[in-house]
């Protein structure tokens, strides 16, 4: 059976930047092995497979695969799929008002709002389906320095220390003192993310673009993603890092993370 698909660039305001996404439609009849093979064929960070929702009041059920495994939740597939479905099903209505899209993911129902922005790329916002939680003790700075090929003194800034947090997928957050340290890392010394382990998410408060708060890189060769241009699930879990080490005041805060710069796909 032939199936339609779309490819998108997410977390970008221009083509050929941001994080690539493949979305396959009308996936009834595809088993796990077939979906994994298709995701491996696309060979982008994630491929989404769209099904009819289990609860008819929702928009769609989706399965998310990297080239090597299925994920219960991921950010850029959620954003891209919500925008695409809203655009395909209600293009004219989307031009006049925001549309609510509810995606059934393995982690649960994810409520999204798709938005048309005149003169800009379409956007979507979603409520994190699970609050960030600390997942255990992070490796020591000494062992991380060996794994990354940098000095122990390169790790940490302010109150920030290495930490394990997740909001659906596990992430090892490692703060680095500078962009120079970010450039000097050797992430291929370890197969990050293997055997269901956490991805490696490096971040620093030195930034390359005005208006950003943090600069990040993510590695998960064990997930089939050597380096990811943008990682929404890690950004969601990063809220836990902020609460632990920045302790923001009550109220609403907007944090902008730049990623993918070193890959030539700024996000």
Image (spheres, rainbow, N blue to C red):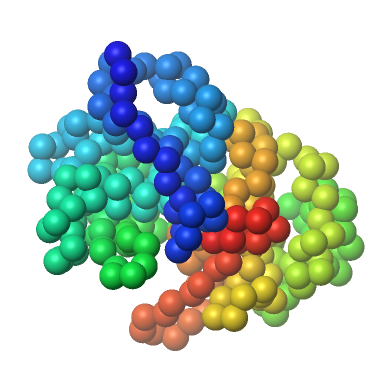
- 202 is higher (above) or lower (below) than 81: below
Task: Give the answer, above or below, for where 3 lies relative to 124.
Answer: above
Residue 71 in view here: no
Image quadrant where residue 57 sits: top left
Total tally of numbered discs in the picture: 0
Determine whether, in the image, residue 31 is placed left or right of residue 143: left
Name above or below for residue 62 compared with residue 84: above
Q: Nearer the viewer, residue 89 or 53?
A: 89
Location of the N terminus by quadrant is top left
Q: Is residue 247 left or right of residue 89?
A: right
Residue 176 in the image: x percent, y percent?
Answer: 74, 67
Vertical arrangement, residue 73 with respect to residue 134, above or below: above
The answer to whether residue 61 of the structure is visible from this angle is yes
**Residue that appears at 33% across and 61% down:** 122
**Residue found at x 36% / y 67%:** 120
Picture quadrant where residue 104 is located: top left
From the viewer's perspective, is 12 left or right of 78? right
Percent position (x, y) of residue 68? 56, 28
Q: Going 61% across and 33% down the picture, which residue do you hit?
A: 224
Residue 206 on image: x %, y % = 69, 76
- Left or right: residue 105 versus residue 38 is left
The C terminus, quarter of image? bottom right
Q: Residue at x 81, y 56 (%)?
A: 185
* Spot occupied by residue 108 in the image (x, y as percentages of width and height): 30, 43
């Amino acid at each position: 059976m032939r199936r339609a698909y779309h490819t998108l660039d997410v977390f970008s305001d221009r083509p050929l930047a941001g994080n690539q996404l493949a979305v396959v439609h009308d996936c009834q009849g595809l088993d796990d092995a077939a979906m994994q093979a298709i995701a491996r064929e696309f060979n982008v960070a994630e491929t989404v497979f769209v099904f009819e929702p289990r609860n008819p009041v929702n928009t769609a059920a989706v399965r998310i695969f990297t080239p090597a495994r299925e994920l219960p939740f991921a950010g850029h597939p959620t954003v891209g799929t919500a925008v695409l479905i809203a655009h395909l099903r209600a293009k004219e209505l989307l031009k006049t008002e925001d549309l609510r899209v509810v995606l059934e993911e393995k982690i649960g129902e994810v409520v999204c709002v798709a938005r048309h922005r005149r003169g800009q790329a379409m956007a979507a916002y979603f409520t994190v389906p699970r609050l960030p939680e600390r997942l255990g003790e992070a490796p020591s700075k000494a062992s991380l320095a060996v794994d990354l090929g940098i000095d122990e003194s390169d790790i940490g800034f302010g109150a920030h220390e290495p930490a394990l947090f997740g909001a659906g997928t596990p992430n090892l957050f490692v703060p680095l003192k500078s962009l120079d340290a970010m450039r000097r890392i050797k992430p291929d010394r370890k197969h990050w993310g293997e055997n269901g382990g956490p991805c490696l998410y490096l971040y620093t408060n030195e930034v390359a673009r005005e208006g950003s708060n943090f600069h990040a890189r993510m590695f998960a060769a064990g997930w089939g993603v050597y380096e990811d241009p943008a990682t929404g699930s890690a950004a969601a879990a990063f809220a836990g890092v902020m609460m632990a080490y920045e302790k923001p005041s009550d109220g609403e805060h907007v944090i902008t993370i730049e990623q993918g710069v070193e890959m030539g796909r700024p996000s």
